[in-house]
Structures are given as C-alpha cells and as structure tokens.
Image (tube, grey):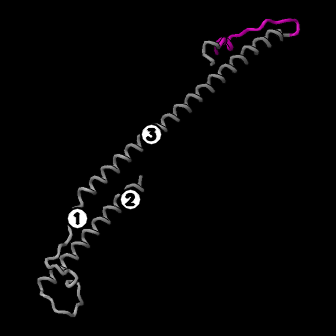
Amino acid sequence: MADLNDISLSTQDILKKQFKTKVKGIDPDEVDAFLDQIIADYDTFEQIIEDLYGQIGKLQGELMTDQRKTQDLQQKNQDQSSRQRLNQSEDVRTYIPTSRNSSSNFASANSKQEPQTERSTNMAIIQRISTLERKVYNLEQLVSGLQKQ
C-alpha cells in the first residue's frame, strides 16, 4: 500500500527547482531526472487514491449491510407487535343460541316467531358481522403497514 511518506517532492520543491544551464540551454538529463521523480510521485498519489476509494467502497458496503439488518430487525419487531395487538384486540364473541334447535331461528321469513328470538338472532348476526369486519380491517392495516415498508 502506498503511503504519503513515499512522496519525494513537495509543491514548493517543484516551484523552486532551478536547472543548470549548458551551452545550448538547460541540461536535458537533469530535466528528465526531475520529471521522472514527478512521475513517480504521481504514481504514488494515484495508488493512494485508489486505496482510499477501495476503503470507501468497503465501508459503504458494510454500512448498507448494517442498515439492512437494522431495518429487518425493526420490521420483525413491528410485525411481532402488530400480531400481538391484533391478537389482544380481537376477543371473538360468538352467539350462543338460547334454544337447542338453532336452525329454527333461521327458518323462512314468513314463519311466525317470537319477537325476542328474532331480535336475538339479528343481534347475533350483527355481532358476527361486526367481529368479521374488525378482523378484516385489522388484517388490512397489518398488510398495508408491511407493504409501505
């Protein structure tokens, strides 16, 4: 792994560099050697940058994994608490007929029955419908809560 200690030139070193002059100008061998140092430093910088991007990618992957685990745990806790609330809120009340022959309560509408029996039968039906509606509503709320997340 590349390190910043591997860098041999600073910006000031490059800025203040003075080349020796020869008969036809500056010494090309000296310029080439200096440019070789600059190229080596650039290679080191590129390696450091690649290493840092690799570390960033690794950390982002770990972060996403941890976030998924957290969301899964929250979802499980919410599902469990929703089921507990659903189970606690639904006391199933069923109608128990007073007479032994309950099928006579559901006989044809033209037959004459006592008003008390008819009222209790209607109340039983309404209670059953109400209980079923509550169950359906609670299940819809549970499903819609799961779909939103």
Q: Which residues are magenta?
A: 7-24
Above or below: residue 79 compared with residue 33: below
Residue 31, image x, y percentages: 79, 12
Q: Secondary structure at mark 2?
A: helix
According to the picture, the residue beneath numbered tag 2 turns out to be 143
Earlier in the chain: of badge 2 and badge 3, it is: 3
The residue closer to the viewer here, 124 or 70, is 124
Q: Nearer the viewer, mark 1 or mark 2?
A: 1
Above or below: residue 124 compared with residue 55: below
Q: Secondary structure at mark 3?
A: helix
Q: Residue furthest front?
A: 100
Q: Amino acid at mark 1?
A: Val
Q: Which mark is residue 148?
A: none
Above or below: residue 135 compared with residue 65: below
Residue at x 85% of width, y 6% of height: 22
Earlier in the chain: of badge 3 and badge 1, it is: 3
Above or below: residue 136 compared with residue 28: below
Dividing the picture into quadrants, the one containing residue 86 is: bottom left
Q: Nearer the viewer, mark 2 or mark 3?
A: 2
Q: Residue furthest right?
A: 24
